[in-house]
Image: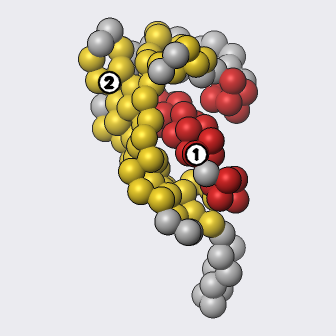
Amino acid sequence: MNSVAFDETMRAGWTHGGERWSFELPSGWGQGRAVFGGLTVAAAASLALRIATRSSARMNVRSARSARSCFAPSPGAVEGRCRLLREGNNVSFPEGRLAQEGKEALVASVVLAKRREGALLAVR
């Protein structure tokens, strides 16, 4: 398996050209023909976060609360698109889509929310 600096790959891996975003899904991060789902969701979520934080100053104080995806792309080049489905004062819902060879390969929805204090105590 190739050594990949995961955080840096997700942050710096996307390149922007015109209206398109591009990313190289690393080989060695898969099983069979597909890349591990966690890596592909992280790639789509990192694009969604990048786009969402550019659209609103409020996003800088939000963090991912959940992510959901469908499909599993193969290693190699992908093109990404993102749109902000809904944004409120406390929660935002960006969606990221990855395509390979002109075909949709992954759809990921992310929920971003502000941290808030609650009355419930969590057991650690």
Q: Is residue 123 visible?
A: no
| Residue 64 x, y percent position in the rendering | 57, 54
Quadrant hosting residue 119: bottom right
* Number of the label disc, if any, that sits on residue 100: none
Q: Secondary structure at mark 1?
A: helix
Q: Left or right of 104: which side holds 120?
A: right
Quadrant hosting residue 2: top right
**Residue most toward the bottom?**
119
- Residues 57 and 33: in front is 57
Image label count: 2
- Judging by the rendered image, the residue that carries numbered circle 1 is 55
The residue depicted at 38 percent of the width and 32 percent of the height is: 97
Q: Is residue 115 above or below residue 28?
A: below
**Which residue type carries mark 1?**
Ser
Q: What colouring method underlies this structural image? A: secondary structure
- Judging by the rendered image, the residue that carries numbered circle 2 is 105
The residue depicted at 66 percent of the width and 69 percent of the height is: 115
**Residue most toward the left?**
103
Q: Is residue 89 visible?
A: yes
How crowded pointer 2 is (Cα within 10 Å; few <14, some 14-19, many 20+) is rated as: some
Q: Quadrant of the C terminus?
A: bottom right
| Residue 50 x, y percent position in the rendering | 60, 38
**Which residue type carries mark 2?**
Ala
Mark 2 or mark 1: whose residue is earlier in sequence: 1
Q: Left or right of 87: which side holds 97?
A: left
The residue depicted at 55 percent of the width and 69 percent of the height is: 89
Q: Secondary structure at mark 2?
A: strand
The residue depicted at 69 percent of the width and 24 percent of the height is: 12
